[in-house]
């Protein structure tokens, strides 16, 4: 069986409790990871803090630069496993997470695989928050395949790749994606589009049997967070659509998602608009879509 390096990126001392829960879930995997790598921003105080808190069975890697992409690149360059799996520091893995991810790699054409991300709400899930928008809190959303399927890219909280693929096509772009608390994204789609374009017959799998649970803090269950995250999603999509090496079908996944919303999610709530929860979710869906569009147009306008 393939050896797996599991990577967890951390940028703040405030995340210690979550990180320890995450590492503990990795130690209890039915298929043990070959190594667990915690990668940190190049902040001496941060590095000293986490080295004093983590056991010897966790490798600490210091990134060459700040930001999530730089952190992931540093971990890949230091990884010793055949497969590099990524999980967020505020997530915990199901016991069979790695076992189910690895089954996908029995197909030699599969170069990447990701799984289902379920939200763990710190408080109760807001009744006005539709499941179709769970991507806002870093989780799998209603509209994704319910069974194994080929996808353009997995979600960063639950994804993996053959390590050799980075040697062939390069690493995550450091000018795209999350930086500290800035809610930008799209580093995963950009990497995966590059992989699929350059490697013949390459496949990326979505396997909902490979489950992680993502903690959702109270601050994420607010209208303000929803607006800012949606706005930044629009900016992120505009960014990757402008990349020189992007193809014309760069946003096909997003177009399919929009079709799902207008064919399924929105009509189903219109039929029950008299129900307060359905009406509020309908308004939130439109509010998020408007915010994404605003961010997209705002970025394009600045580029003129």
Image: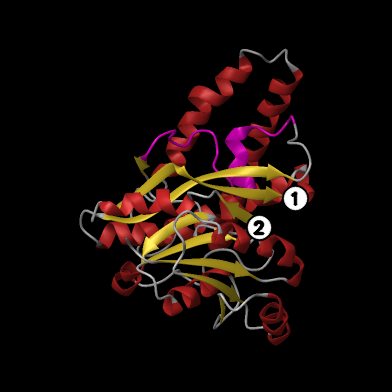
Q: Is residue 248 visible?
A: no
Q: Which mark is residue 234?
A: none
Apparent side of residue 15 relative to residue 198 in the rendered image (left or right): right
Q: Which mark is residue 90?
A: 2
Residue bearing mark 1 = 217
| Picture quarter with the N terminus | bottom left
Q: In the figure, residue 87 lies in which quadrant?
A: bottom right
**Residue depicted at x 24% and y 61%:** 199
Q: Secondary structure at mark 2?
A: loop
Of the pair 166 and 83, the residue shown nearer to us: 83
Q: Position of residue 144 (x, y in %)?
A: 47, 37
Q: Is residue 137 magenta?
A: yes
Span shown in magenta: 127-148
Instruction: From the image, give the main secondary structure of the stretch colored magenta.
Output: loop
Apparent side of residue 74 relative to residue 247 in the rendered image (left or right): right
Q: Position of residue 239 (x, y in %)?
A: 50, 59
Q: Position of residue 223 (x, y in %)?
A: 76, 42
User: Pointer 1 and pointer 2: residues touching (CB < 8 Å)?
Assistant: yes
Q: Secondary structure at mark 1?
A: loop
Q: Position of residue 262 (x, y in %)?
A: 52, 26
Question: Would you call the spot at circle 2 few (<14 residues within 10 Å), some (14-19), or many (20 or more)?
Answer: many
Q: In the figure, residue 21 lies in which quadrant?
A: bottom right
The Cα–Cα distance between marks 1 and 2, rounded to whole angstroms, is: 10 Å
Of the pair 28 and 48, the residue shown nearer to us: 28
Residue farthest toward the bottom in the current orientation of the protein: 44
Q: Earlier in the sequence, mark 1 or mark 2?
A: 2
């Amino acid at each position: 069986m393939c050896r797996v390096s599991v990577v967890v990126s951390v940028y703040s001392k405030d995340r210690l409790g979550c990180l320890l829960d995450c590492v503990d879930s990795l130690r209890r995997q039915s298929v043990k990871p070959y190594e667990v790598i915690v990668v940190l921003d190049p902040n001496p105080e941060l590095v000293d803090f986490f080295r004093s808190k983590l056991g010897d069975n966790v490798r600490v890697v210091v990134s060459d630069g700040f930001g999530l992409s730089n952190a992931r690149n540093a971990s890949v360059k230091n990884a010793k496993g055949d497969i590099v799996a990524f999980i967020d520091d505020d997530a915990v893995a199901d016991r069979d997470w790695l076992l189910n991810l690895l089954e996908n790699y029995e197909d030699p054409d599969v170069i990447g695989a990701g799984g289902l991300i379920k939200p763990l709400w710190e408080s109760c899930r807001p009744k006005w928050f539709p499941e179709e928008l769970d991507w806002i809190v870093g989780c799998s959303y209603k509209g994704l395949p319910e069974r194994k399927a080929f996808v353009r890219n997995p979600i960063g909280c639950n994804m993996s790749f053959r390590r050799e693929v980075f040697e062939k096509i390069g690493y995550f772009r450091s000018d795209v994606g999350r930086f500290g608390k800035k809610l930008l994204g799209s580093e995963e789609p950009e990497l995966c589009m590059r992989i699929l374009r350059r490697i013949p017959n390459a496949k990326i799998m979505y396997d909902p049997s490979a489950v992680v649970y993502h903690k959702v803090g109270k601050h994420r269950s607010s209208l303000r967070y929803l607006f800012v995250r949606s706005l930044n999603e629009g900016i992120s999509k505009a960014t990757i659509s402008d990349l020189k090496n992007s193809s014309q079908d760069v946003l096909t996944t997003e177009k399919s998602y929009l079709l799902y919303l207008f064919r399924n999610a929105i009509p189903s709530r219109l039929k029950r608009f008299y129900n307060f929860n359905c009406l509020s979710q309908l308004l939130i869906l439109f509010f998020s879509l408007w915010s994404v569009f605003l961010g997209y147009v705002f970025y394009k306008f600045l580029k003129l």
